[in-house]
Amino acid sequence: MANLNSNFLGIKSPNPFWLASAPPTDKKINVLRAFEAGWGGVVWKTLGSQVKNVSSRYSSLNYNGRRAVGFNNIELISDRPLEINLKEIKEVLKLFPDRAMVVSLMADNDRKSWHEMVKKTQDTGAHGIELNFGCPHGMVERGMGAAVGQDPEIAKMVVEWVMEVATIPVITKLTPNVHSAVPGAIAAIEGGTNGLSLINTIQSVTGIDLDTLVPNPNVGGMSVFGGYCGPAVKPIALKMLTTLAQDERIKNVPISGIGGITTWKDAVEFMLLGASNVQVCTAAMISGFKIITDMCDGMNNWMDEKGYKNLDDFIGLSVPKITRWEELDINFHIIANIDQDKCIHCGLCYIACEDTSHQSIAIEKGKPYNTYTIKEEECVGCNLCKIVCPVTDCITMEEHRKGDEYLNWIEYQKRGLPLNDH
């Protein structure tokens, strides 16, 4: 079988699946249950100055019958006493020395506070530290969390403070609440960070109760912007991860991927785009710790099928496959094809194409049901019909090149070719 052993900055774990810094990693009992279930590591929920959380704290985005497609929280860092957290971290390490134990930190914004927090954490025997530069609510108003991650100069300064006393690997967790994660990543690297993780949660409002008119979650008739996560944020996380993996100044720095990872397939996608391991939160909160079994089995089976022996064999392989729009092949062309044996004659493809796309599907009514066929000369290969079709592989996209040579937009313009030729 494939080898799932992970080595992230020298922090070893039996698989690349860590629980992210969040409610599931807030105390000993949770972490022990996670390790017993098979998780490779955890990032202990953020430690810092004492806070007080509110009630309620969570809300979700439900869509088309599926609950919690997106998940929102307004919970702060750990509200348990620091000494209790540190004591429990030590105890867990003794019971599970083979699992990764990373501790998330968010100290007050001065050198002394960060030094003290780092030293106390290192005294537990923890394997690494994650700097929380991403929390988008509550802590921001105190000049912490995303307020640090959104200012590269401050981020660099804080990382430098940490590196002055750090004796274990330091991971800087980046905020997605910026136009680009690259400046913050470069600042952290210049400050001396050993690794990066992203994304943290995205500021959001998941919805409003139309009876009370109060946005969710409701805290005594009021609400605030929360941190958005879950499956809905995965595309954003993958994009931000790729921008780091493609940057020459960053690409050799190990990255821990976070953001909507629910299945082993999600994890593989993150690793194909440059993540050395992954962190999971919402999926565990919705379905429990036992999901780790399917995650490990799924990744193992996929690696065996593809012939990959170790994680490093496929990490980053998809990064070169994302390019600039101007470099895409204009001569590449696909046309939809409808398998009449699989078609259930629902007409969704026809409606979508006729109303909102290129009127490329013909309809023959009756006999005894409507039949749909592709007008090949009109089809631009946009994929919309395939996307809306409810039957797997009923609509497929077939290649019909418009020219033998590779031709991108830059060369197309140089040659002065007509815009309506393609």
Image: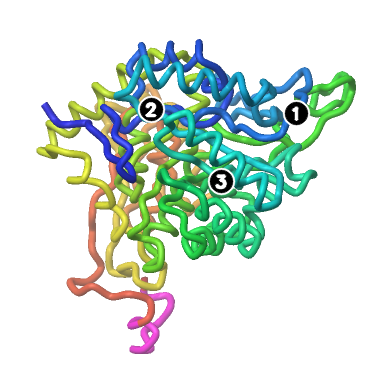
Disc 2 or disc 3, which is closer to the eye? Answer: 2
Q: Quadrant of residue 83?
A: top right
Lower position in the chain sequence, tag 2 or tag 3:
2
Q: Nearer the viewer, residue 414 or 130?
A: 130
Residue at which label 2 appears: 41
Q: Residues within 10 Å of mark 1 (few under 14, many from 20)?
A: some
Residue at which label 3 appears: 355
Residue at which label 1 appears: 51
Q: Residue 366, can we see it? A: no
Q: Quadrant of residue 60?
A: top right
Amino acid beneath label 3: Asp
Lower position in the chain sequence, tag 2 or tag 1:
2
Give the residue at x 71% y 34%.
49
Lower position in the chain sequence, tag 3 or tag 1:
1
Q: Residue 374, can we see it? A: yes
The image shows residue 345 at horizontal and vertical percentages of 39, 27
Q: Does 214 appear in magenta?
A: no
State the predominant SS element of the stretch in magenta: helix
Kindly state the secondary structure of the residue where label 2 is placed: strand
The image shows residue 76 at horizontal and vertical percentages of 69, 30
**Magenta span covers which residues?**
411-421
Amino acid beneath label 1: Val
Q: Nearer the viewer, residue 93 or 380?
A: 93
Find the distance from the CA under tag 2 to the CA under tag 1: 26 Å
Q: In this view, does 314 lie to the left or right of 378?
A: left
The image shows residue 229 at horizontal and vertical percentages of 57, 34
